[in-house]
Image (cartoon, grey):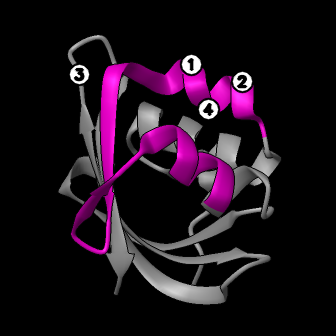
Amino acid sequence: MTIQTARLSDPAVRAFVTAVNAHDREGFMQLLAPGATMADDGADRDLAEWIEEETFSTHGHMDVDNESAGGRALIARYRNDTWGEMRTRWSFTITDDGRISRFETDQA
């Protein structure tokens, strides 16, 4: 069962999912702390390149099925035009000022 985005517990994670689903690149970038990093399937990736290829140019969309760790860990069905839909795991590191300094995703 999908959790409504507005009901996600962590404000930064909620804003992340909202920006992805709205294809709001500017809003997405404002959520990231300076020097933010990410990993996909256990490998660090170039953040700007990954965002473009996996999210914005391919119409990425997240349907969250479960959250844990105070809302900073998600299980979601993620889909984009390149890969179709897959069950994914997401984890987020949030700075004291509420920005995302790192996120990691892999298949769940």
Identify the residue at horizontal 33%, vertical 29% (top origin). 36
C-alpha gap between disc 1 and disc 2: 6 Å
Q: Where does label 4 land, which residue?
A: 28
Camera-side mark, 3 or 2:
2
Q: From the top left corner, tell me how far across and down residue 100 is, in percent.
A: 35, 31
State left or right for residue 35 relative to residue 3.
left
Depth order, front residue of 63/82:
82
State left or right for residue 3 relative to residue 39.
right
Chain-order first, disc 3 or disc 4: 4
Which span of residues is magenta-colored?
Answer: 24-53
Q: Which amino acid does label 3 sit on?
A: Thr
Q: Are marks 2 and 4 in contact (CB under 8 Å)?
A: yes
Local packing at callout 3 (Cα closer than 10 Å; few below 14, some 14-19, many 20+) is: few
Q: Where does label 2 land, which residue?
A: 26
C-alpha gap between disc 3 and disc 4: 15 Å
Q: Which amino acid does label 4 sit on?
A: Phe
Local packing at callout 4 (Cα closer than 10 Å; few below 14, some 14-19, many 20+) is: some
Q: Does residue 73 show up magenta in the picture?
A: no
C-alpha gap between disc 3 and disc 2: 19 Å
C-alpha gap between disc 1 and disc 4: 5 Å
Identify the residue at horizontal 68%, vertical 25% (top origin). 27
Q: Where does label 3 land, which residue?
A: 95
7 lies above or below 99:
below
